Amino acid sequence: MKHLLSLCDAQNQVQELLDLAMRFKNSQMEEKPLDNKTLAMIFQKSSTRTRVSFEVGMAQLGGTALYLSTNDLQIGRGEPISDTAKAMSRYVDGIMIRALKHEDVVELAENSTVPVINGLTDLEHPCQALADMQTIKEHKGDFKGKLVFVGDGNNVCNSLILISAILGMDMAVACPQGYEPNIKILKKAHILASRSGAQIEVTSDIKAALKNADVVYTDVWVSMGDEEEEEKRMREFMPFQVNQNLMALANDDAIFMHCLPAIRGQETIAEVIDGPQSVVWDQAENRLHAQKAVMYYLMKD
Ligand code: CP
Ligand code: NVA
């Protein structure tokens, strides 16, 4: 694996990355393995967790992280992404990018001589999915249960589908018609699942999806970039709100997950996200450990 743009890039490394993440969490790794390394972090969209966890993670690994908003970069004034990649490759040891369009991240990587990490695009959020699987392992012990994603078949959902298919975890997506996950991702996932034994299904039947659920996961109804559709989405997603009634359809010991940021009163409610089944803060913490694992894997000499 040279870059982490999609979980498909990491299909043979996911287990190793999860093990590394646990070792970082348990302080079992050497001190400052990325001494003197620099990570450029390009942001075209807002971020709290991704920015802070990458920046803190890089400091803990002994390196430096540069926060670069596209408003301040020449990309914002029209410099081609390929030129940006070539210039940056001469200064830094890795580039993390949060971009509006996945194709831009692919183009950046094609022109970069240093590793590129996807910090969220319209298509995928691979670092989130790694932290999520670390969290599921901690709370459930293994990946033998069933993960149910309720809501928009978005970037977070796409990456969860791929990582579930890689690790052999059964996954159901319950979404309104018209908001299904990306079709190419589903095709890739079915190939991966045929090797791992995972069952991957997409349905609009919430009740059927939540039967035997061990993990109930949701995300915002309006992702960054979808703001124009807000009113329509509010109407169409309301039956998919993860409230106590929906949680009651899952197994009694099911955990509730959300990548955050969350909007209480929309995709979930306070009683669930702030309730005893919620593991969202462990999930948020694990972003730090999972990303240290990714940076270590890609950037260590
Ligand atoms: N979950 C996540 O990526 O959060 P941020 O948008 O705050 O980085
Ligand atoms: N699906 C959300 C995730 C934010 C971390 C978005 O893309 O805005």
Image (cartoon, helix red, strand yellow):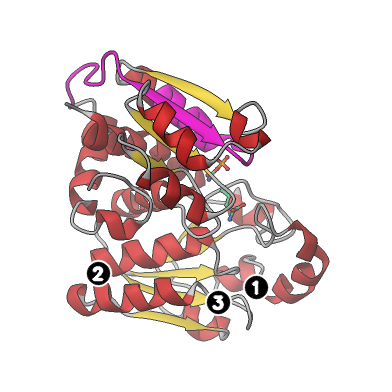
Q: Which residue is mark 3?
A: 180
Marks 2 and 1, Cα distance to the nearest angstrom? Answer: 26 Å
Q: Residues within 10 Å of mark 1 (few under 14, many from 20)?
A: many
| Image x and y of residue 59, in percent | 38, 18
Marks 3 and 2, Cα distance to the nearest angstrom? Answer: 21 Å
Q: Earlier in the sequence, mark 2 or mark 1?
A: 2
Q: Residues within 10 Å of mark 2 (few under 14, many from 20)?
A: many
- The residue depicted at 39 percent of the width and 39 percent of the height is 286
Q: What segment is highlighted magenta in the picture? A: 29-57
Residue 285, visible in the rendered structure: no
On screen, residue 194 versus residue 115, left or right, reads left
Q: Which residue is mark 2?
A: 168
On screen, residue 214 versus residue 261, left or right, reads left
On screen, residue 118 versus residue 197, left or right, reads right
Image position of 118 with respect to 71: above or below: below
**Most distant residue in the right direction:** 231
Classify mark 3: helix, strand or loop. Answer: loop
Q: Which circle marks residue 72 in the picture?
A: none
